[in-house]
Every structure is written in C-alpha cells, then in structure tokens.
Amino acid sequence: MIKLLSGRVVSQKNGATIIQTNDGVGWDVKTGSIVLEVGQQAELYIFTQFREYEISLWGFLSLNDLEMFELLISVNGVGARIAHSMVTELGRDLIIKAISLNDANSLKISGVGLKTAQKIIFALKEKITDQDFAVDESQLNLNQNFKEALDALEGLGYNKVQVSKILKDI
C-alpha cells in the first residue's frame, strides 16, 4: 500500500494533483483544497482507497492529517471526500477541539450538517482523548481565522475553492 509519495508537481486542478516521482511515474492524487505549485517538489502522505471499480489516492501534507482522515472515515456515513474536505478545510486541531468541546457547529462544512457533525463527535469522542492528539493552539487560531475569512468571502459571493487557494497563499 502506498503511504508516502515524493516527487515533482506536474499538474493541479479540480482538487487533484499529479505527482511525478523520480522513476517517472505520474500519480493522480486527490488533494482537495491543498495548494501546490506546478514544478515544485512535494511530499504527500497517502491514503489508498480501494473500491469496486476504482483505486483512489488521497493526499495530505502531514502524517497527523492522514491519521485524522482515517479516524473520520471510520465514522459510519463519513466518506473519503467529506473526511478529506474536513481535514484540509478545518484542520486537524480545530476538529480535535470541536470534538473535545462537543461543538458540532464548528465541524459544519459543505456536505456536513449538524446531524453528521454530532455523529462524528459521538463516534470519536473517546478516540481523541489520547495524548497523541494534542492541540497546537497557534495552529488552531490560524485555522479558525482562515475559516472565518473563507466564510466571509463566500458570503460575499466569491467561489470557495478560489478563495481558499488565495487565503492559503497569504
């Protein structure tokens, strides 16, 4: 199973990135709102999903993000697309804090309503009490500010994906 890909970014569009490794193989990785520049070297932690007619690679910038993704997809009703969006848009630390504080509203994003957020909290409450899931407060504040800016600009009618890319560059 693939767990780590290192290589040059060949293309990035529509939430997918093609990474060409040193042996010349180009891997299509679902990266969602993660912004990588074409031509740059990248290292992504990978979740390999096997389905009846498809094998998908889901990429993350850190091993911690990959672990959070794996926890989220263990919740009944939360698929890879939703879990990936949650990790890349909200950030691992905000998810942990929301779960530990029973704050379902903080987990709501496109595709995740109140009931799904409550289900996530109920299913993962005991799993995140482990010391391996310590929250980095500085990153949490950054992610919260990012989410607030994203929500404000989206409320003004801007495209969420484009705004997300611009905010991450800032």
Image (spheres, rainbow, N blue to C red):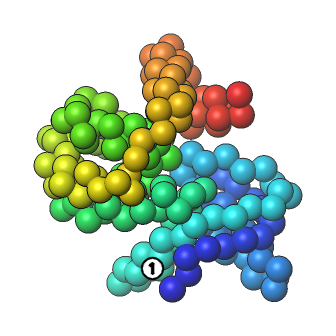
Where, by quadrant of the figure, is residue 69 drawn? bottom left
Which x, y percent locates residue 128? 28, 53
- Pick the residue in front: 4 or 48: 4
Other-residue count near label 1 (Cα within 10 Å), few / some / many at <14 / 14–19 / ≥20 = few
Q: How many numbered tags mark residues here? A: 1
In the image, taking residue 12 as reference, residue 110 lies left or right, namely left
Furthest residue to the front? 131
| Outermost residue toward the right in this view | 39
Q: Is residue 102 above or below residue 68?
A: above
- Residue 120 versus residue 54: which sits nearer the camera? 120
Q: Nearer the viewer, residue 65 or 81?
A: 65
- On the question of residue 3 being in view, the answer is yes
Q: Is residue 61 left or right of residue 85?
A: right
Q: Position of residue 32 (x, y in %)?
A: 54, 51
Q: Residue at x 40, y 47 (%)?
A: 134
- Residue 160: tell me if it is visible: no
| Up-down relation of residue 9 to residue 133 (above or below) | below
- Work out whether 133 lies above or below 30: above
Dot 1: element: loop
Classify residue 143 as left or right of residue 121: right
Q: Position of residue 104 (x, y in %)?
A: 22, 34
In-image side of 125 versus 73 (left or right): left
Which residue is at a point 47% across and 32% down the rendered structure image? 137
State which quadrant residue 116 falls in: top left
Q: Is residue 145 above or below residue 67?
A: above
Mark 1: which amino acid?
Glu
Identify the residue at horizontal 39%, vertical 57% (top origin). 132
Residue found 19% across the figure and 49% down from its top: 125
Q: Quadrant of the C terminus?
A: top right
Q: Which residue is mark 1?
A: 54
